[in-house]
Image (spheres, rainbow, N blue to C red):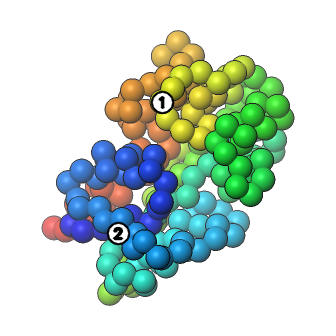
Amino acid sequence: MRLVLATRNPHKQREFSRLLHQHELEPLPERFQLPPETGATFAENALAKARAAAAHTGALAVADDSGIEAQALGGGPGVLSARYAGAGATDAENLAKLLYKAPAGSRLTYVCAVAFVDPVTGAEQLFQGTCFGRLADRPRGGGGFGYDPAFMPDEGEGGETMAEMSPERKDAISHRGSAIRQLAAWLEDRAR
């Protein structure tokens, strides 16, 4: 099945490609601009991006929105995760702000919503994945992206961060991995 992947994030492109390897993922057209993430939830943002990509290309589209929720920050930064340290902030700047604002060892939840849109039938489907963990005292590991260097998943081994895991191990327990596996199973059922 051919799917337009509504993201320009190379890290997300790699994760989707690994987990949806049985499908042909097409990049967004170069001049196409994704809508701004103005939704109040991850699901709203994912749907907006998938709808826009499907409408622009006329093809089946998938998109995600994801982020981190810190219990110590009342669920923040949430949907503002990519802009936590300000518009245009780098992953390192966002992570530094989280480490400054939340205490080491505090509870975290990674959340990912994946949206599917069929522009021909109007069918839409949402999938959500979560991963629970704790905040490390400092960034560790060279893999992953975003908040991965300070996210110690409950399903990890010996307090390792997501950035210290192999891509395959991370995919097996991550929020995005869970949501994409749900999408893959649904697409398989839909194709029957």
Q: Residue at x 68, y 27 (%)?
A: 135
Q: In which quadrant will I find the C terminus?
A: bottom left
Which residue corresponds to mark 1?
Answer: 143
Q: Which three-letter amino acid code belongs to the residue tagged 2?
A: Val
Q: Residue furthest left?
A: 192
Q: Quadrant of residue 99?
A: top right
- The answer to whether residue 64 of the structure is visible from this angle is yes
Q: In this view, does 65 lie to the left or right of 170?
A: right
Q: Residue at x 59, y 41 (%)?
A: 146
Q: Which residue is more in the foreground, 27 or 51? A: 27
Q: Is residue 180 left or right of residue 80?
A: left
Which residue corresponds to mark 2?
Answer: 4
Q: Which three-letter amino acid code belongs to the residue tagged 1?
A: Gly
Q: Which residue is more in the foreground, 137 or 93? A: 93
Q: Which residue is drawn at 81% across and 45% down?
A: 74
Q: Which residue is more in the foreground, 40 or 2? A: 2
Q: Which of marks 2 and 1 is nearer the N terminus?
A: 2
Find numbered disc 1 in the image and state the secondary structure of the residue it sits on: loop
Q: Residue at x 37, y 47 (%)?
A: 14
| Distance Cα–Cα, label 2 vs label 1 | 26 Å
Find numbered disc 2 in the image and state the secondary structure of the residue it sits on: strand
